[in-house]
Image: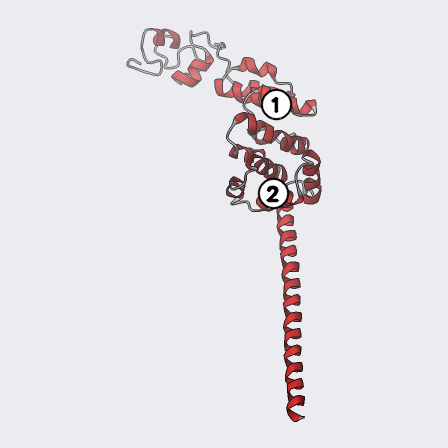
Amino acid sequence: MLNKKRKIIILGCIVLILLSALVFVLIFKKDSLVNNENEKLVNKKNLTIEDDYNEDIDEILQELKNIHPEFTSSQLEFYLEAAINNTNYSNLCKRRSDHSDCVSSVAFIKGDSSVCGEIGDQKMIIECADPTVQRIAAKRNEKCQFSEGSDFTNCLKNIFLVYRNPDDCSNLKPENIQQACKDIIYYETAFIGQNRELCKNIIDEKLNQICNNNITDKSQNADNDGLSDYEETSIYKTDPNKTDTDGDGYSDGDEVKNGYNPLGEGKL
């Protein structure tokens, strides 16, 4: 009888221990899930803080879902995790069969069209960038208007970073965003080639003025010395406002034409 009672007591103790262990595991698992969810919320908050406009991540994901209704919940969750993982999103997307969708979604969530450069093909880069640019361009273009000079042009350039020619902008909406994209490309092309003629294509008044101010007209010759202002400032380093930069009695143009140094003694 005593042995039977002892067995019952021991069995009861074992059951209590097992129940206690089960309760502990459930509590630990719950805390772990809560911590994981909190960590995700913190990461999502950090991603929002990195964006200048404090856009809500859930709203961005919903907008992405509206654009791509075929995306599953697991896809969207992965894309968000990849976007949060700033240092490794490229490798995370490369491992997937939906690599292009992954990259374009990360670009959309982060609001950074330069991410689309991971794709490689220019046509696909533009297709990737268009939804992202249309999401961010209106707000960022408005912000750019408060900048001046090179800050203004750099601000615009950062919005339309992956676009290389005006035709790349053709699918952007609304029309003013499409024109802003074309304007910055015309400016960049004009500035690189020092071709003021291209400034005429720029509709934005501020950018048009900057373009004309920053570019030396290749055909202009302010001092009538036989060298254009562009040749004097970019090639020979002579003064475009002085006919004879070195003051030796011969015009800069005549010296260059005859092989002499317009800045002093000797030949070119």
- In the rendered image, residue 40, in percent from the top left (x then y), is placed at 63, 52
Circle 2: residue type: Tyr
Quadrant in which residue 18 is drawn:
bottom right
Q: Is residue 249 visible?
A: no
Secondary-structure class at tag 2: helix
The mark found on residue 110 in the picture is: none
Q: Give the residue pinned by disc 2.
A: 79
Decide which of 41, 138 is in the foreground and name it: 41
Identify the image quadrant of the N terminus.
bottom right
- In the rendered image, residue 176, in percent from the top left (x then y), is placed at 68, 23
Q: Residue furthest bottom?
A: 2
Distance between the Cα atoms at labels 2 and 1?
26 Å
Quadrant in which residue 173 is drawn:
top right
Q: Give the residue pinned by disc 1.
A: 169
* Front position among marks 2 and 1: 2
Circle 1: residue type: Cys
Q: Tell me which residue sits at (66%, 93%) in the image.
A: 2
* Disc 1 crowd, CA 10 A, few/some/many (<14, 14-19, 20+): many
Q: Tell me which residue sits at (62%, 48%) in the image.
A: 46
Q: Residue furthest left?
A: 266
Q: Is residue 58 left or right of residue 198?
A: right
Q: Tell me which residue sits at (67%, 81%) in the image.
A: 12
Decide which of 108, 10 is in the foreground and name it: 10
